[in-house]
Image (tube, rainbow, N blue to C red):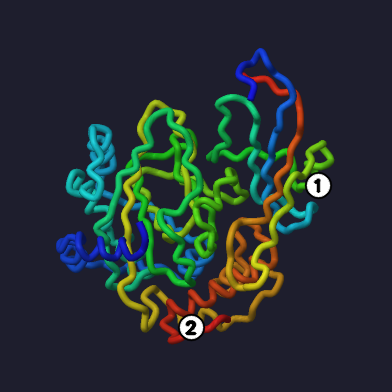
Amino acid sequence: MSSSSSNPGVRQRLLYLHARTPSVFSDILGYTPVEPVRDYRAEITADVSDWPYNTVHDALVDGWQIVQFPHLQAPIDDRDLDVVGYEFILQKLEEVRDG
Amino acid sequence: MDKNQLQAESRAESLPADAERRENGTDMSHLLTDLEMVEFIVNGYHLLELDLPEGLNERMAGQLDGLDYNPGDAIAEVVPDLWQVIEHPAVKSALASLLGEDYEVMGHRHWHCKQPHTGHMSWHQDSTNSRDTRIDRLLGLFYPTDITPEMGPTIIVPGTQFRNAPTDRMATYTNIRGQVPMVLKAGTFALTHYDLWHGTAANRTPVKRHMIKFLFRRVRDNKAPTWNHDPDVMNVPTAWGGKREDPKNVLSFGNPIGVGQSDHYKERQIRWKCWNNLLGVADAADA
C-alpha cells in the first residue's frame, strides 16, 4: 500500500449500490462510495443530498465497472425478509491522491 | 444482550416503583388511533412531542451536561425528572396501545451522549433480531433539547423492523433512501420497534447531544385491541393502485423506502399478521 501523498498511482475506488431489484435498471435504495484515500470514512448523514446515479446502469454509463453482482435473496423461503435491496459492488481504477 | 437476557434482567432489576407509578393517576386519553397503529406497523416508529412542564427539558439537559460519568441503568435515579417523561399520559397511552395495558418498563435504560465532534455510528440493531411478526419490544428515545442535523441525530430506516438482517449484514450501507433523521424539538419521545435499523450521524457541533433510551416490553398477548379501535375500520374496499390514506390501504400499500415488489408482498403479509395479532385474533393467519 502506498504510504504518502508523494506516491499517488492508480487506486481502486469502490461504490456499493443497493438496488431495488437485481436489474441494473432498477432504482437505487442505498448509496455508499468508498474513496481510496487515507482517513476516508463512508458515513451516514442527516442531510442526504441527491445521489449522482439513480440506477446501477447510470453508474455504468459513467465508467464504473461491476466487480460483484448481488446474491439472490430468499431462494427457498419466500416469506422471510432480509437486507434492503440487492448489492452491486462497482469499481473505478483511477489516479487518486491523499488529501 | 439477547432477548432472554433482557427478560431476565427485567425480572431482576425492574423497580417496583415502575408499576406503582404507572397505576397512579393513569390517563389513557391519548390512546393511538387505528391509523397511528398501522403507521407504526408499517414504519416501525411513532413520535410524541410532549407538553412537559415549563423548564423541565432545560433542567434535564443541564443535569446531563454536568454529568462526568455514565450511570447506565441508574440514569433515571440521577436525573429523576425523567420519570415525568415515561409517566406522561401520551407516553403511557402510546405504550398501552402498542404493548398492552400492562406493559413493562424494563430495568435497562441508557444515556446516549453524542460528544462534540464525534463520528457517525453505523446501522445496527441493539441485539439479535427477533424476526417475528409481532410488536413485543419497544425502544423509547427521549431528547431533552432541540436536535439539529449537525448535532448527530439518531437516524432510522422506516419499515426495516421485520427484516432478518443482523447488524454485520448492514455494514456496507450508509445512506438509504427514505431514512429519517430524528431532527426534533426538545421534549420529543420517539417510540421505535426494537428491531428497527438505526444509527447516528456525526456530531459536528461543539455541544453534547443527549438521548435517553428506555426499553419496554409486552407481558401478555392481546385478547382485544388496546388502542382507540373502530371495529369497522377495515370494512372498506381495498383501493388497489389508489392512494387513499386510510388504515387498510396504509397497511396494505405503505412502502416507506420503496422496496421491490417481492419484499413488499412479504411485508404486507407480515403486517396483516401483526395487525391480527394485535386485535387478539387467536392463531393469527396470514392475510
Q: Position of residue B164 (x, y in %)?
A: 53, 63
In the picture, the quarter occupied by the N terminus of chain B is bottom left
Q: Position of residue A28 (x, y in %)?
A: 70, 50
Residue B215 relative to residue B38: left or right? left
Q: Position of residue B256 (x, y in %)?
A: 59, 58
Q: Give the amino acid at mark 1.
A: His
For image coordinates 50% across by 61% down, the residue present is B161
For image coordinates 74% across by 38% down, the residue present is A91
Residue A9 relative to residue B250: left or right? right
For image coordinates 19% across by 68% down, the residue present is B23
In the picture, the quarter occupied by the C terminus of chain B is bottom right
Secondary structure found at label 1: helix
Give above or below for B155 relative to B263: above
For image coordinates 58% across by 36% down, the residue present is A42
The number of numbered discs placed on residues in the rendered structure image is 2
Q: Give the amino acid at mark 2.
A: Ala
Query: Mark 2 and mark 1: span between their CA atoms?
Result: 42 Å
Q: Please, which chain is the residue tagged with disc 2 on?
A: B
Q: Position of residue A62 (x, y in %)?
A: 81, 37
What mark, if any, has residue A57 been given in the picture?
Answer: 1
Packing grade of label 1 (10 A; few <14, some 14-19, many >=20) is some
What mark, if any, has residue B284 been given in the picture?
Answer: 2
Give above or below for B276 relative to A21: below
Give the farthest residue toward the front: A1
Q: Residue B228 lies in what quarter of the image?
A: bottom left
Q: Are marks 2 and 1 on the same chain?
A: no
Q: Nearer the viewer, residue B259 or B54?
A: B259
